[in-house]
């Protein structure tokens, strides 16, 4: 059974990576929501590390940010390894 603490840290890392990527694009949550069709509340929940995103959601969000999903995941992995 996976360690819940590691999973929580992974979710937080992907959420923070998403927020960083969004802010680097000078994009508000509302603007990202508009571009992607993903609700602002769902984006906020993801950025807070409280939502386990599906691959499809990562594809949609990374596309809305004009980046490859692998770049977003790499940002999360970098955050995760530097914090742990």
Image (spheres, rainbow, N blue to C red):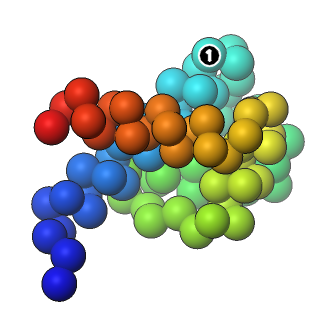
- Relative height, residue 71 to residue 44 (above, below): above
Question: Where is the N terminus found, in terms of image quarters?
Answer: bottom left
Q: Residue furthest bottom?
A: 1
- Residues packed near mark 1 inside 10 Å, few (<14), some (14 to 19) or many (20 plus): few
Residue pointed to by mark 1: 24
Q: Does 41 sit left or right of 69 as displayed?
A: left
User: Can residue 36 be seen here?
Assistant: yes
Residue at 29% across, 39% down: 80
The x, y position of residue 64, in whole percent, is 79, 40
Q: Quadrant of residue 18?
A: top right
The x, y position of residue 21, in whole percent, is 59, 27
Q: Secondary structure at mark 1?
A: helix
Question: Where is the C terminus found, in terms of image quarters?
Answer: top left
The x, y position of residue 60, in whole percent, is 76, 54
Q: Quadrant of residue 15?
A: top left
Residue at 61% across, 36% down: 71
- Relative height, residue 26 to residue 71 (above, below): above
Residue at 58% across, 68% down: 54
User: Can residue 40 be seen here?
Assistant: no
Looking at the image, how many numbered discs can be counted on the residues? 1
Observer-nearest residue: 79 or 11? 79
Q: Does 15 sit left or right of 1 as displayed?
A: right
The x, y position of residue 13, in whole percent, is 36, 42
Q: Does 60 sit left or right of 77 as displayed?
A: right
Residue at 70% across, 18% down: 25
């Amino acid at each position: 059974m996976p360690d819940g603490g590691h999973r929580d840290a992974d979710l937080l890392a992907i959420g923070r990576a998403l927020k960083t990527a969004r802010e680097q694009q000078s994009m508000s949550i509302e603007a990202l929501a508009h571009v992607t069709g993903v609700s602002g509340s769902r984006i906020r929940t993801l950025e807070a590390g409280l939502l386990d995103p599906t691959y499809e959601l990562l594809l949609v969000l990374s596309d809305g940010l004009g980046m490859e999903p692998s770049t977003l995941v790499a940002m999360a992995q970098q955050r995760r390894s530097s914090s742990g």
